[in-house]
Amino acid sequence: MRLRRRALRTGVGLLLTGALLAGCDSAPAESGPSAAAPSSGAPRQFKPGAAGAGDPYFPSYGNGGYDVGRYTVKVRYDPDKDRLTGTATVQAAATSDLSAFNLDLAGLSVRSVKVDGAPAKHTRKGDELVVTPANGLIAGNGFVAEIAYEGKPEPLANEVLGEGGFLHTGDGAIALGQPESASTWFPVNDHPSDKASYDFEITVPDGLTAVSNGVPAGKSRDDGWTTWKWSERAPMASYLSFVVIGKLRVTTGEHKGRPVFSAVDVDVAEGAADDSIADTVKVADYLETVFGPYPFDAYGGVVISDARIRYALETQSRPVYSAGFFRQGRNTEVVAHELAHQWFGDSVALTKWQDIWLNEGLATYAEWLWAEHSEGRRAAAAFATRYSGSPASLWRTPPGKPGVENLFSQSVYQRGGMTVHALRVAVGDKAFFQILKTWAAEKRNANGTTAEFIALAERVSGKKLDALFDAWLYGTSRPEEPKAL
């Protein structure tokens, strides 16, 4: 995510104009018959799943007791009435014996819930939907929950990070934001540790486009409404899902056998934004040379014009950019940042939010690499400028443990990028680029932690790196200049 300015921080791999400016690989779970009781004959102890995934920074985000394999989300949105009706089908597997489980759903009213085809009880506790199936769910078994819901979607307000989620616009809507947003338009296990595949069917009035993640799966018209279908088969963290509804300039094509679908708000002047997004495949091809194969089945980008959104976000397979990034002309550095996230942040997702530097530091460094490749501006020079010119406040905030209030701070981005360069200097280019490719390959479609990244870097390089990472990620003063080990 990249922020344009230090203003609204609804997170997304943020990027700044001017200053320069996250489970397991889940397979779709199928519903099946109940398993037999334990061989010991002891009765099962069914308990409610946890109302949170246990993230130290956001304890209430996500839920426990199950692992989602696939979401099928079908929504109909009427911009004139600002009203959404929807049905979400959640295919999951219980990871413990469950008497009840939670889904995150902000504001919207639930009409009915079924689990494995049978009516289930449901209650609300704030933004939590508590589902009690007719029978307990046995650990290891798949189940299918179907939730019908409706209402006027509202964004989520975070007192530290700002506003994110579903926003009504002049001609449609935008659902976007980090660290949470999905729960404002469908029920979800809203934490990156539980990745899943997604199918979206978004019905809007004729004349409007509805763009989301993944491969375009066709559209159909019926009585003044158009249904746009999208399919993201690779596991995706929930905050990386999005929808943009409105009047958009659409460009389609194909690259390396994958569809390319991009869209620009018609209120954005033709030119720089369109040209920058058109460079998506060129930038992605370069990043493949340093990170390994592009990890998803589609390419593209979406440019929006809304004063409430001043950032770019690495929404999976199709990043979303504020039009502000292109007001001064063509800008492929922001494109490089968000596309780098397709490897680091999307394919390799966070396990916990404290480790966001893994997303932002690597994406920031990708900007420096792209600038070196496309313009001849060396990454070492980008590092040197920041190392010598950054304010003291940047060095006081450790990017490996920034705290919630500094989750999207310049330390996470710029000091995170400097940490990546320090690693490169320490191990040399051959080992460094092998580390990046190995991390992307071994953690593809999964989740990672800082500790795992450090262990992999030491394994690939054959060097002890604890002192380097301690200084650059967790120290509260400027480290010594990096040197080869």
Image (cartoon, rainbow, N blue to C red):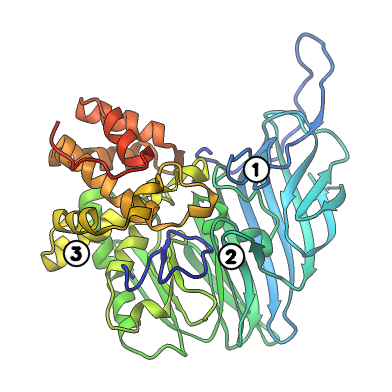
Q: Amino acid at mark 2?
A: Gly
Tell me the SS state at disc 3: helix
| Residue ranking furthest to the top | 40
| Res 151 visible | yes
Residue type at numbered disc 1? Pro
Q: Relative to residue 235, is residue 48 drawn left or right? A: right
Of the two numbered discs 2 and 3 in the rendering, the one whose residue sits closer to the viewer: 2
Report which residue position mark 2 lands on.
Answer: 162
How many marks do you count on the picture? 3
Which of the image's four quarters has the N terminus?
A: bottom left
Q: Is residue 221 above or below residue 230?
A: below
Picture residue at 81% right of the left edge, 21% below the top: 44
Going by the numbered disc 3, the residue's amino acid type is Ala
Q: Is residue 434 left or right of residue 203?
A: left
Cα distance between the residues tagged 2 and 1: 18 Å
Residue 171 screen position, x and y as percent:
60, 87
Residue 138 lies, in percent from the top left, at 75, 29
Q: Quadrant of residue 338?
A: bottom left
- Under tag 1, what secondary structure? loop
Residue 466, position as x, y percentages in the image: 30, 28
| Residue wearing tag 1 | 59
- Which numbered mark, 3 or 1, is in the foreground of this view? 1
Which residue position is annotated with label 3? 371
Q: Where does the image place residue 6, in percent across and percent down from the top left? A: 45, 68
**Image quarter in which the C terminus is found:** top left
Q: CA distance from mark 3 to mark 1?
A: 39 Å
Q: Is residue 294 visible in this depiction of the protein?
A: no
Q: Residues within 10 Å of mark 2 (few under 14, many from 20)?
A: some
Relative horizontal placement of residue 349, taking residue 55 as reference (left or right): left
10 Å neighbourhood of mark 3: few (<14), some, or many (≥20)?
some
